[in-house]
Image (cartoon, rainbow, N blue to C red):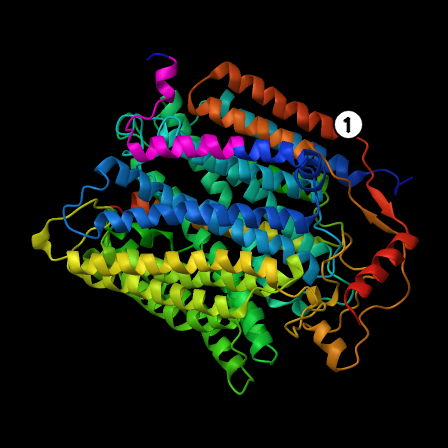
Amino acid sequence: MKELFPIKHVMGFVFSLILTSVALLVYILDMSFALGLTILLITAFAQAALQLVVFMHAGESEDKGAIYTSVYYGIIIAVLTVFGTLLAMIWGYV
Amino acid sequence: MDFFERFMIPHPSPAIYAAMVAIVLTSIAIVVGLTYFKKWGYLWREWITTVDHKKIGIMYLISALLMLFRGGVDALMMRAQTAVPENALLDAQHYNEIFTTHGIVMIIFMAMAFIIALMNFVIPLQIGARDVAFPRLNAVSFWLYFMGAMLFNLSFVIGGSPSSGWTSYFPLAGDELSPSVGTNYYMLALQISGLGTLITGINFIVTILKMRAPGMTLMKMPMFTWSGLITNVIIVFAFPVLTVALAMGTMDRLFATNFFTTTDGGMDMLWANLFWVWGHPEVYILILPAFGIYSEVISTFSRRNLYGYNSMVASMVIISLLSFVVWVHHFFTMGQGAMVNSIFSITTMAIAIPTGIKIFNWLLTMWKGKIQFTVPMLYSLGFIPIFTIGGVTGVMLGMSAADYQYHNTMFLVAHFHLVIIPGVVFAMIAGLTYWWPKMFGFMLNERIGRWAFGFIAGGTCLAFFPMFISGLDGQARRMYTYSESTGFGFWNMLSFIGALGLAVGFILIVYNIYYSTRYASRDIGDDPWNARSLEWATHNPVPEYNFAITPQVNSSQAFWDSKKNGHTLFKGGYKEIHMPNNSGVPFVMSVFFFIFGFAFVFSMWITAVVSLIGIFACMLHRSFEKDHGHHISVAEIERTESELRGARNE
């Protein structure tokens, strides 16, 4: 019976519900803009990672290598682009 | 404004009226010709509905050549206008429109289409596949690109062309300073064809990763396929940035949002930033397939395997990352501090290293090789010195402090043309000549080809070297005229003569295609160049299923091994082959996209909504369609194979 029960997916589902309700707190509770946005960013990326790994089966096929390579590559490019833009347009702008 | 007035050209001239008449007459001639020769059915069955990667490749090729001539005429008009001081051939507005459309047509609709044409035709053959991973999606890609290109070219005669440069910087491109619909065309046409490109990127990554012949590990792929893989990875990560920027720009122009305005919290320079976040990787999207072609051509005609295979792959992977971290060098003078400019100067210098490695690898491939001076090889040999001059001046521009002197002058124009023309145009002509026999079953005439090369290489140098001098003298780019006292006249006249030389070269290529179609021998075998990779292992012309038996691969040049080292490519007998069916849905859907784009340009919302419903109806139709493709029986394969072998006269 134990191997039939999809414990991983149930846990994943519960965890994603928790992440959603934590994100919802930002709206319900009265908190500073910076704190609210920090919570939203963290919960959003945790949620995305959870969905990708648990429910979209990222690590379960033989293409595991290609999938994770493209995810990491995408993250690197996104981070470089966002911070490069901030650097050029705001922080380093005189 | 009266409804019909919006469709008028805001700035008409006799040349545009003549073009209108010419377009109408050509369209009538095409329709009448197709009806008279009863070719409508043939066109629909064999081309419009096709999902065959070879035919789609050829359609991309034809479109790219058409766009090459459209963009080339723009270039000639620009050079003619500036050939003498105070020239009145074009007025300022027309000159603005022409340099804008020249840039867009050449980059997006010529160069992109050309590389995708060659990737489409060659990559599935090189990896021993029967088609791309998603053949129907491939047709969608082509038709979206084609409709985008047609929409953009329509701007010329309906409503007026964009005139704020191919970079379309805001606030100049905003609706206050560019009130005509020209920039709407720019936004929508690029959006539609950009979608097609993005789909191509995904399609080819999957094809290359999943559909290689047995035995072909990643490090045994031919170099053109490797460059295709890296190119498509860059496409998938760079094009969404353009998509977003275009969507924001469209909303600014049509729905009064404030992303790129100078008021209400808008940030006009963010457009330039986003444009180049896409735009610099785009440069490598264009150049990497060209590098792949040169690798194939140089190794084939030096009769040696490619020197430094691993370092070639490594340098492309490094380029794919570095190409995303240099974009600020396109606007060093827009107000960032010295720290930011220094960072991007250093990354720019760094990207010259992997490019330099590739140059040395080609030189070392030729070293001690038995070089044959065929036309593709001539372009490859011409590419190395001219590209290096373009590249080294790029390093000069990349030094941010010095860039304050060079920026926005003809020096810059000379630099990027001397990189893009040998880098992309030479490679495309080399690739076209090299793979022409595989596409059409005969070879292009070598003698005419050599003359064309001479005119094109000489014309390129003569057209662009003088710009270094006039640029350092202070001639700004995009200036429609200048006074005699500036002394630019002499250099610009030289450029004009060079441009005429280029024109002669391209006319010779067209003549060569005509001449060879009529007179070239059809009895050339499957492998006329004595080449090394798998595309030459199948018949000429390539049958629908590419390979009757899936080839077995043992190295990066399996076909060469099968010719010289006793490797057996084809093991076992024929088996039934499963192929995809043709479909008209991609074409119909893209026509809806065209109508959608046109309606959006002119804010005709009812038409836009109706065509959007049409687009979704096509998608819905696809979702519920039961299409399992068709099977080619063993008997039919045997028949085709014996016919093709008979045609070879062996």
- On the picture, is B124 further left or further right than B605? right
Q: Residue B8's spot in the image, x, y percent?
A: 35, 22
Q: Residue at x 72, y 26 (%)?
A: B621
Does the magenta run of residues contain B8? Answer: yes
Q: Chain of mark 1?
A: B
Residue on which disc 1 sits: B624
- As helix, strand or loop, the secondary structure at mark 1 comes to helix
Q: Is residue B543 left or right of residue B11?
A: right
Q: Nearer the viewer, residue B311 or B67?
A: B67
Is the stretch drawn in magenta largely helix, strand or loop? helix
**Residue B21: percent from left, percent from top:** 41, 30
Based on the picture, tell me whether residue B119 belongs to the magenta stretch: no
Q: Give the image quarter of residue B609.
A: top right
Q: Is residue B204 above or below residue B196?
A: below
Q: Nearer the viewer, residue B68 or B219?
A: B68
- Residue B401 appears in the picture as rendered: no
User: Is B191 located above or below residue B377 in the figure?
Assistant: above
**Quick check: B375 above or below B514?**
below
Q: Position of residue B642 (x, y in %)?
A: 85, 62
Q: Tell me how many marks there are.
A: 1
Q: Which residues are magenta?
A: B3-28
Residue located at (52% from left, 39% from top): B193
| Disc 1 residue type (three-letter) | Phe
Q: Is residue A28 left or right of residue B135?
A: left
Residue sitting at 18 percent across and 41 percent down? B88
Label 1 crowd bin: few (<14), some (14–19), many (20+), radius 10 Å: few
Pinpoint residue B23: horizontal percent, then vertical percent. Answer: 45, 33
Please, which residue is most extreme toward the bottom here?
Answer: B368
Quadrant where the image shows the N terminus of chain B: top left
